[in-house]
Amino acid sequence: MTIAILYESEEWSNIYLRDYIRDKGCEVMFVNFEKAVLNAAFFDSAALLVNRIFPSSYFRGHLKTYFKGIDFLREINKKGIPMINSFEALMYDFDKRLVCNTLRDNKINTPEIYCTTKDFSLDKIKFPCIVKPNSGGRSRCTAKVENPDELLEFLKTLPPIEFIFQEYIKSIDNYTLRIEAINGEVFSAVKRSMDENGISSYHRGAVYEKDFKLDKHIEDLVIDTLDILNIRMGGIDLIISNRGPNIVDVNATSNFSKEFVDFLQKNPLNKMGDLIINEYFKITKSVS
């Protein structure tokens, strides 16, 4: 039996993870969802499926992944093939509104989503607000807008997918915290600067800081959040406002550049690989 890694983008992190697991002696099936002709039976030899398809796939032109990936993985889930992260985590990864509603139901501070393009109402929106894809990432087509006129102009530039209109959370120090956790433990925490428009993103040239101590109550909040969303390895974006910590984004398929790993001076992909391998051996031992 094998470990199957399902991906859609030739990222350094995906290739590194594949090679790390292979080098530990495990057989790996490395499958590009965007290019392969698949059905659920294709993975019958897989003891464990590792999901590495990203919600930002639309913005790379990977429309097969964006529009059909969830349905395909739903079939895998129905067949009972274990997934890491879970299928539930995948659903959250591709639906920011669902994340927001779930966390608010669990009394976790997260920005209010006023409406989406599916139920758009200008009267519901308070300004400034954040506009971003309901399923997306890497800050693509994301903006802080200050007033209705600016919003309506920005809407003219957007592609025909669902967008959310989200409460703007003002940081007390002009930073977002990016916290990665693996298997119930915080692995890393960095501060990421915001640009002049209030957006914090590696892809927009954010500056990182890592030499600070993460407060225990924030660490606990991150672990609780990922537990609620059934995410065993993932990242949280968090802003400290004058009302306290706010979860502003959740990522169930964290991507890492080599430059970022070098900056951390430790490799989360090794820890992720070890978790995957341990899970694989638990599964194969139970069926042998």
Image (cartoon, grey):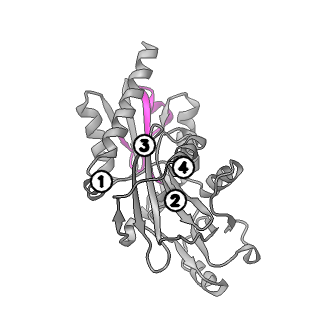
Per the rendered image, the range of residues in magenta is 30-54
Between circles 3 and 2, the one closer to the viewer is 2
Mark 3 crowdedness (10 Å alpha carbons): few <14, some 14-19, many ≥20: few
Mark before the other along the chain sequence, 2 or 1: 2
- Return the residue nearer the eye: 194 or 129: 194
**Mark 1: which amino acid?**
Leu
Note whether residue 43 is visible. yes
Distance between the Cα atoms at labels 3 and 2?
39 Å
Mark 4 or mark 3, which is nearer to you? 4
Q: Is residue 47 above or below residue 155?
A: above
Return the residue at label 4.
Answer: 217
Q: Which residue is mark 2?
A: 238
Residue sitting at the far left: 23
Q: Position of residue 40 (x, y in %)?
A: 50, 34
The relative height of residue 132 versus residue 218 in the rendered view (above or below) is below
Quickly name the residue at label 1. Answer: 264
| CA distance separating discs 4 and 1 | 22 Å
**Res 246 label:** none
Q: CA distance from mark 2 to mark 4?
A: 13 Å
| Disc 3 and disc 1 in contact, CB within 8 angstroms | no
Which of 103 and 38 lies nearest the eye of the viewer? 103
**Labels 3 and 2: the sequence-earlier one:** 3
From the viewer's perspective, tell me whether residue 138 is left or right of residue 256: right
Q: Which residue is mark 3?
A: 37
Viewer-closest of 45 and 212 = 212
